[in-house]
Image (cartoon, helix red, strand yellow):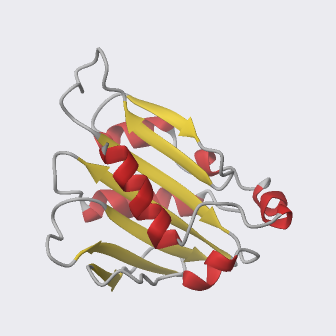
Amino acid sequence: MLKLILLIVVSFYVGGCTARSSSLAKANTKIEPCSLLTKEEAAAALNGNIEVSLTADPRTCGYSLVAPGSANTARYASIVVVVVTPDSPDFQKFGSSQDERTDAKPIAGVGDKAVLFMSKVSPDKGAKAMHVLKGNLYLGIGMSTSTPPVSEDVLKSLAVKAVSRLP
């Protein structure tokens, strides 16, 4: 359930995860979102065994704790990475959210520009997401866990690693 909530949150921040045109799909064949973070990096951030899940959207990759039959049965956590290219209508939405309940703050030291999104009411609970602009594209990274808080430092560290692997 929490994984679904995170996917919705990141989708909202990024402006939608549906490929808008065939040119967008072609543009993303060069950037595999699952190559931006390793399984080991995601496992360390989520503190457990994970599985990597591809979605129907070629711009998106998800990393989720493996719950059934593992030590993670009572805990849920996931990371979602979305790559947005300039030919996507979503590109113009970098760094913005239309949700009044979401606070955005600039983050230094990641890409050309980065913005962190979190709840205004409960910034230490629930999901956090970050938009990172690098050159002519940006990526969205979101993290959610059933054992808050989501660490801003961990999210920033993941973003730095992912950005370093962009072309």
- Percent of width and height locating residue 105: 32, 84
Horizontal placement of 59 versus 53: left or right? right
Residue 160 sits above or below residue 73 on the image: below
Q: For the image shown, how many numbered marks are present on the structure?
A: 0
- Percent of width and height locating residue 154: 31, 56
Horizontal placement of 120 versus 134: left or right? left
146 or 101, nearer to the observer: 101
Horizontal placement of 71 versus 35: left or right? left
Quarter of the N terminus within the rendering: top left
Residue most extreme to the top: 69
Picture residue at 61% right of the left edge, 85% below the top: 92
Horizontal placement of 136 versus 114: left or right? right
Picture residue at 37% right of the left edge, 54% below the top: 6
- Percent of width and height locating residue 12: 46, 69
Q: Is residue 135 visible?
A: no
Residue 14 sits above or below residue 52 on the image: below
Q: Is residue 31 visible?
A: yes
Residue 34 sits above or below residue 167 on the image: above
Picture residue at 56% right of the left edge, 77% below the top: 133
11 or 159, nearer to the observer: 11
Q: Quadrant of residue 103?
A: bottom left
Picture residue at 26% right of the left edge, 79% below the top: 101
Quarter of the C terminus within the rendering: bottom right
- Percent of width and height locating residue 107: 36, 79
57 or 36, nearer to the observer: 57
Q: Quadrant of residue 163?
A: bottom right
